[in-house]
Amino acid sequence: MVELNPMEQLIITAMKELGATKDTQIKTADDIMKKCSRPKGMVTNTLVALTQKNLIKRVVREKASGYYIISTEV
């Protein structure tokens, strides 16, 4: 199990509640920000950290990147 700080736990929980658990159901940083009521910069930084830990995947799209959970450890 990967150690997560409270903000990372909040983001993962928000992503699960939004259904961002596979590549066909990606959510933007704005979607996640609205769900967990935190500043966008904080959410974006946390998404980068979770991506570096290989817990979520970032999908680059034309307008806004999307994210979804790839790890079963969370």
Image (cartoon, rainbow, N blue to C red):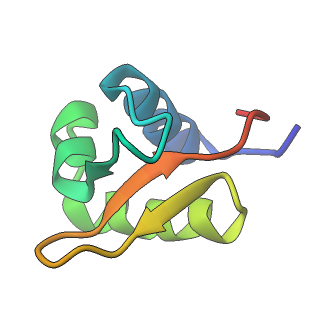
Q: Which image quadrant for residue 18?
A: top left
**In the image, farthest residue toward the left:** 63
Position of 53 relative to 22 (above/below): below
Position of 68 relative to 65 (above/below): above
Position of 44 relative to 29 (above/below): below
Can you give x and y, in whole percent of width and height, for residue 25 in the image? 34, 39
Left or right: 59 with respect to 54?
A: left
Residue at 19%, 44% (x, y): give it. Answer: 31
**In the image, farthest residue toward the right:** 1
Residue at 63%, 46% (x, y): give it. Answer: 70
- Along the line of sight, which residue is nearer the eye, 70 or 35? 70
Left or right: 55 with respect to 8?
A: right
- Along the line of sight, which residue is nearer the eye, 48 or 25? 25
- Along the line of sight, which residue is nearer the eye, 32 or 39? 32
Residue at 45%, 47% (x, y): give it. Answer: 23
Figure quadrant of the N terminus: top right
Can you give x and y, in whole percent of width and height, for residue 48 in the image? 50, 70
Left or right: 21 with respect to 55?
A: left
Can you give x and y, in whole percent of width and height, for residue 46 in the image? 48, 61
